[in-house]
Amino acid sequence: MIAAQAGDKSAYRLLLDELQVWLVRYYRRRLPPDAVDDAVQEALVAVHTKRHTWDPSRPFAPWLAGIARYKWIDRLRNLSATRTEELPETLSVGDHGDGVLSATVLAGLLATLKPAQAAAIRLVKLDGLSIEEAAARTGQSRSLVKVNIHRGLARLSRTVEGYSDGE
Amino acid sequence: MASRRLINGLVDGLTPVRPRTRWRDALLLALVGAAELALVMMLQPMRDDMVSAMHDPMFWWKVGGSLCVTVAGMAALVVLLTPDARVGAGRRFVLGAAAAVLIAGLALIGGGAMPTPRSMPDWREGLSCARLCFLYGLPMLAATVFVARRAAPARPRAAATAAGLAATGWGSVVFCWTCPYDDPIYITLWFGLALTAGALAGRLLLPRLLRW
């Protein structure tokens, strides 16, 4: 490494070859097989770019182990960020198209009613509230809620029949 | 195969480098600190009672304590800038400095040199002091980040904490020359708050800048 810091290319090639063997062994024990090559290459690049940080008066092995460990943790972080998992059998769901279409048509039909009728139908028939709850929510009396539901549904029937006749 | 190509590329791109030494990093930080202190002393008026303050042990405890924390933070940072650094090495410096400052304070109290706490200034004044300690530390913070990015801190969070502490510590040293308060509780509270905030800010904000 001292020779490599001075710019000796043949010594550097020898060093990197030996480091590669050591790094492959190091990462095989710590990473999934398909992540080993990338980790080795990242560590080699780090050794290259940070070669000036090794102080020749200090031992080389702990310096190299520090870089290998740092890149290992880095790789683990990346693996956890991009973790792949098998998709469960129950993942697929039915087509929501019909539901969306029905909801759109229903919203259009309700818009043709008087607001009080539409609100009564929406609360009681769609949201499942009781007559009392709907009356409290809309400020209408119980009997008025019933009347509005009845008239509103009758009007919806006529509208739908009109659509059918038109088709 | 890919590794072989990579090694060939790295060997082709090899240029001589000058090995990093801890002393050179420390010298660079010291020069930045000295330049900032000189600049502030030239541009900022010193406290009005500086002559009498310089005979007060409390003033020197304030300056010495801040300096002690700065040196500990810098020493921890410089040690943490190599891949083979251990976190414990940096922690030892900081804990040692904190102990030294406290022991010095207790010795001053024992010797009767520590003044009794006076009426505390308004908390807004204290908060302003803490903020100035932090702001005066920003040039040193920039220098520590510059030094750290050229090195290889394998413990980015520890290095970032040390950098924040060193920078705010130096900010406190610089601010000591203009801060008119020498009350021990005031100093411990507001300077301590600035140092803690600096260390925490470093720990939270700097690690992403120090990754390599």
Image: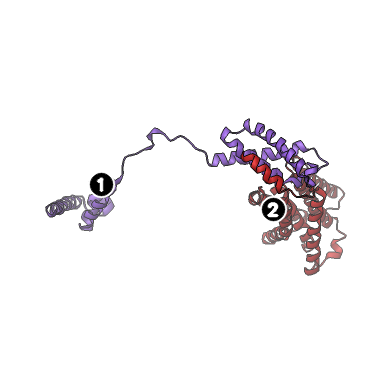
SS state under label 2? helix
Q: Are marks 2 and 1 in contact (CB under 8 Å)?
A: no
**Residue A50 image label:** none
Q: Position of residue B93 (x, y in %)?
A: 78, 44
Dot 1 alpha-carbon crowd within 10 angstroms: few under 14, some 14 to 19, many 20 or more:
few
**Residue A40 visible in the displayed image:** yes
Q: Which of B160 and A70 is in front in this view?
A: A70
Specify few, some or many for label 2: CA neighbours under 10 Å numbering under 14, 14-19, or 20 or more.
Answer: many
* Residue A72: quarter of image: top right
* Residue B198 numbered tag: 2
Type of amino acid under label 1: Leu
Residue at coordinates 81% horizontally, 58% vertically from top-left?
B31
For marks 2 and 1, give the CA distance: 58 Å
- Residue A126 in percent (x, y) is at 25, 46
Mark 1 lies on residue? A126
Q: What chain letter is assigned to the residue under label 1?
A: A
Shown in red, the chain is B
Q: What element carries label 1?
A: helix
Q: Is residue A158 left or right of residue A102?
A: left
Q: Chain A is drawn in which colour?
A: purple
Residue A161, placed above or below residue A3: below
Instruction: Identify which residue, A10 or A15, lies in the foreground.
Output: A10
Colour pattern of the rendering:
by chain
Q: Mark 2 lies on which chain?
A: B
Q: Can residue B91 be seen in this view?
A: no
Instruction: Name the spot of residue B39 as percent of width and height, x first.
Output: 79, 66
Residue type (three-letter) at the residue carrying disc 2: Gly
